[in-house]
Image (tube, rainbow, N blue to C red):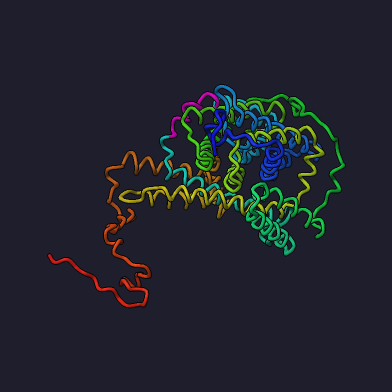
Amino acid sequence: MSKKNNAPTRPEDERLPLGPTIGYGIQHVLTMYGGIIAPPLIIGQIAGLNQGEIGVLIAACLFMGGLATILQTVGIPFFGSQLPLVQGVSFAGVATMGAIVTSGGGLPAVFGSVIAASVIGLLIAPVFATVIRFFPPVVTGTVITTIGLSLLPVAAGWIVGPGNDAAEGATAENLLLAGITLVIVLVLSKVPVGAISRLAILLSIVLGTIVAVFMGKADFSAVGEGPVFAFPSVFGFGLPTFELAAIISMFIVILVTLTETTADILAVSEIVGTKVDSKRIAAGLRADMLSSAVSPVFGTFTQSAFAQNVGLVAITGVKSRFVVTAGGIVLVVLGLLPVLGRVVGAIPSPVLGGAGLVLFGSVAASGIRTLAKVEYKGNMNLVIVATSLAVGMLPIAIPSIYHQMPAWFVTIFHSGISSAAVTAILLNLLFNHLGARASKGANSFVAAPTRSIPVAYLEAFEDGDSIVDGKIVDRDGNEVALDRPEH
């Protein structure tokens, strides 16, 4: 195929026709919708807001998430990584913001702390981005794998369904609905028509929802309730207040957000097959921090890249950043048209859970593929991967494992992603930088040297020859005698 002079030099710069662009953009929105509305739901409930006020919080988070996504994907000088990354309210700060609310500061103190900490984060973003050389494949592969594994409980929670006790498990109907959606994803993924296979997630959610209607598991009765159009109000919950303790706590959250966003930028660049340097990472982090600093003006919280959508890029193979830009525009529209948000919100969670199993598993698989590129011979990389994955799994296996620790520790390590990232970075520094010479071959965990067979020996094999129990046999099962050289 001949290349035009205006052909994109980077995979992420590809432009698709308008129809597929909008379709894939909607698919991104559906993938992360449950995750983006969860933080305002939780914080709103902690703050004692009524349903209408919580609806305002959700609309604001959709609106700002859309603007942040557009900034991140389109980019302006010094702001935006220009990668297919969807932005939304970060889960990393939910516990901290909840603590600020209950300590007496209320939502104004939360908004003030987000503004102040995000401005500090904006200032340190270029310095933070210079750590890219400490993110080799042994680190990025571990973090990407952990991102996928840490998201699987989200899919499981969707399958159980909101308001149900996870300890009692999912109902048979929920499991059936999730299973049907999963099967639809797999079947559509095998369809030899590119437009269908790439839209497998979106189509499976639509078809799964139709199945749910017939099963009596979908309820769209509340779609008509409430306003059709509403613009997010400026400082609708009061002017922000600035409390030092709250700002310090939120700054720790910002550091975690910077770490997670850096990991997501590296993960999606690996999946897309494009190069990123410290300047591009810094631009992505600045976009994060600028969006986070502006968010409280419209009544929402810190913004960060959504790991869920990294998996969507991996499974669909659609690398265009403009597809995600379209998703950002859809988010803005949803923020301005609450009625559309209510339609999306009515999609049964087991349907999202069934699709999420493939999505989030794809992220983990991408991490494993990256780890396959790591050199394990004569170094401690095996220990780095093993330990980091194990530490990252702890808060996933037992979410309350760190509840007895200080608040700053919980903020950093309550996320499996940040736990694995911090551990992998520190161990990589210890074994591959500070102690690189001392660690080579000095421990039983060091991977055994790779064996090799001279090509000349392989050329002596004939059709049908094989190796059985360490012996070479021909096609008839007869052992082939070895001609050993005399010494």
Let me know if residue 180 appears in the view. Answer: yes
Query: In the image, is 128 to the left or to the right of 308?
Result: left
Return the x and y of residue 87 as percentages of the image width and height: 63, 36
Is 447 included in the stretch rendered in magenta? no
Give the image quarter of residue 120: top right
Return the x and y of residue 143 as percentages of the image width and height: 49, 45
Query: In the image, is 410 to the left or to the right of 99?
Result: left
Q: Is the magenta stretch mostly helix, strand or loop?
A: helix
Return the x and y of residue 21 as percentages of the image width and height: 68, 38
Return the x and y of residue 368 as percentages of the image width and height: 48, 51
Q: Residue at x 56, y 27 (%)?
A: 286
Is 128 included in the stretch rendered in magenta? yes
21 and 87: which one is in front? Answer: 21
In the rendered image, the vertical position of residue 135 relative to residue 148, given as above or below:
above
In the rendered image, the vertical position of residue 444 relative to residue 337, given as above or below:
below
Q: What stretch is highlighted in magenta?
A: 122-132
Question: Which residue is the extreme one toward the front?
Answer: 2
Q: Residue at x 70, y 44 (%)?
A: 30
51 and 453: which one is in front? Answer: 453
In the rendered image, the vertical position of residue 157 relative to residue 140, given as above or below:
below
Q: In which quarter of the image is the C terminus?
A: bottom left
